[in-house]
Image (tube, rainbow, N blue to C red):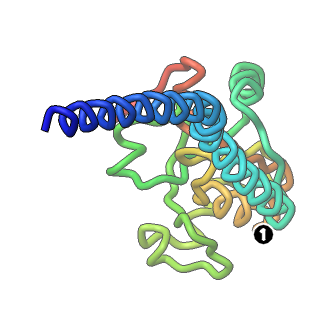
């Protein structure tokens, strides 16, 4: 019986020995694989975000071409406001949920839908007509007009700028960064 206990002890020692080497091997493999999986985890989101950014950029480019308007960035809009008294800025977001709470100073408001609006539909413009939109913009077709909404992915400013071009206005800009970019630059906003 003592011999069996000694054999059992020797067997369990060998298993412990094998277990130690097996554990060491597993740990070594994990340390070798970890940097690759951590790299994928850390940068996988970055790569996916880049694809999303690319899609937004391409859509913005295509919308701009289709709409026939120009783009303006945050600093360009700030400079335009400071230098040109005749510029009209139009917030294309809903009055109650957005414009009333916060908008770019001196901006007028006229709601447009997020999705494309190839035909005028008062149900999508807070019951406002194309005649009311034309009245807001005024008779001077060469006046500088800038349309914005919330952020780059928002299509409201695209619809507003596209409709201004359709109505014959020739100096039409879309400010794609919208109120988010304006606030991100630290510029003041107004509210009612």
Quarter of the image where the C terminus is located: top left
Q: Position of residue 137 (x, y in %)?
A: 66, 54
Tell me: residue 184, above or below residue 54: above
Rendered residue at 55%/19% (across/down): 187
Figure label count:
1
Tell me: residue 151, above or below residue 61: above
Q: Could you classify mark 1 by the number of other residues whose Cα lies within 10 Å: few (under 14), some (14-19), or many (20 or more)?
A: few
Q: Quadrant of residue 118?
A: bottom right
Any part of residue 106 in sight: no
Rendered residue at 64%/60% (across/down): 160
Which residue in the protein does label 1 denote? 166
Rendered residue at 61%/59% (across/down): 155
Residue pushed farthest left?
1
Rendered residue at 48%/73% (across/down): 124
Q: In the image shown, does 66 or 34 lie closer to the viewer?
A: 34
Tell me: residue 26, above or below residue 94: above
Quarter of the image where the N terminus is located: top left
Q: In the image shown, does 150 or 6 lie closer to the viewer?
A: 6
Lateral position of residue 95 relative to residue 170, left or right: left
Tell me: residue 126, above or below residue 169: below
Q: Position of residue 19 (x, y in %)?
A: 40, 34
Q: Position of residue 53 (x, y in %)?
A: 70, 47
Q: Position of residue 172 (x, y in %)?
A: 79, 50
Q: In the image shown, does 57 or 15 lie closer to the viewer?
A: 15
Q: Quadrant of residue 13?
A: top left
Element marked by disc 1:
helix
């Amino acid at each position: 019986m003592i011999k069996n206990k000694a054999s059992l002890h020797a067997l369990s020692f060998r298993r412990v020995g094998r277990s130690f080497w097996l554990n060491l091997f597993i740990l070594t493999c994990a340390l070798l694989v970890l940097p690759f999986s951590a790299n994928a985890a850390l940068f996988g989101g970055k790569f996916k975000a880049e694809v999303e950014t690319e899609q937004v950029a391409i859509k913005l480019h295509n919308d701009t071409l289709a709409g026939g308007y120009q783009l303006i960035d945050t600093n360009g809009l700030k400079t335009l406001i400071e230098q040109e008294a005749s510029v009209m800025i139009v917030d294309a977001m809903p009055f109650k949920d957005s414009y009333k709470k916060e908008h770019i100073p001196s901006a007028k408001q006229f709601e447009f839908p997020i999705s494309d609006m190839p035909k005028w539909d008062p149900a999508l413009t807070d019951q406002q007509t194309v005649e009311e939109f034309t009245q807001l913009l005024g008779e001077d077709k060469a006046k500088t007009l800038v349309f914005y909404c919330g952020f780059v992915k928002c299509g409201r400013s695209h619809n507003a700028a596209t409709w201004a071009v359709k109505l014959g206005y020739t100096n039409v800009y879309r400010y794609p960064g919208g109120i988010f970019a304006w606030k991100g630059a630290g510029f003041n906003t107004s509210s009612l």
